[in-house]
Image (tube, grey):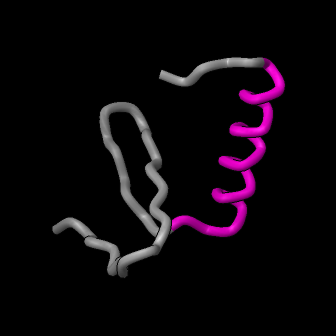
Amino acid sequence: MRNIPRVAAGDAIAFDVVGQEVRVRKAQPADLAFARSLALRAEQCQFTPV
């Protein structure tokens, strides 16, 4: 049985990839901080995400 997270409009989600399995969950503050730091670093490197 798969656990389906309860998310509402505006909730952020995170994906955990382990091998061929992908798990979806509600994002935690650390996930959001990590995403912000990646975005900032991409801007500093003038990297254009695909």
Magenta part, dominant SS: helix
Give the residue drawn at x 79%, y 19%. 45
Across and down, in percent, residue 17 comes to: 43, 40
Q: Is residue 40 magenta-colored?
A: yes
Across and down, in percent, residue 3 comes to: 27, 71
| Vertical position of residue 12 compared to residue 45: above or below | below
Left or right: where 23 falls relative to 44: left
Q: Is residue 22 magenta-colored?
A: no
Q: Kindly indicate the quadrant of the structure image that contains residue 37.
A: top right
Of 14 and 50, nearer the camera is 50
| Vertical position of residue 21 compared to residue 14: above or below | above
Instruction: Specify the quadrant that holds the N terminus.
Output: bottom left
| Vertical position of residue 44 compared to residue 25: above or below | above
Give the residue drawn at x 45%, y 62%. 13
Q: Kindly indicate the quadrant of the structure image that contains residue 29.
A: bottom right
**Magenta stretch?**
27-45
| Vertical position of residue 25 compared to residue 14: above or below | below
Give the residue drawn at x 21%, y 66%. 2
Give the residue drawn at x 66%, y 47%. 35
Left or right: where 39 falls relative to 22: right
Q: How many discs mark residues in the rendered view? A: 0
Left or right: where 38 falls relative to 21: right
Across and down, in percent, residue 11 comes to: 46, 73
Across and down, in percent, residue 44 comes to: 83, 26
Left or right: where 23 falls relative to 1: right
- Single out the residue that lies furthest toward the right: 44
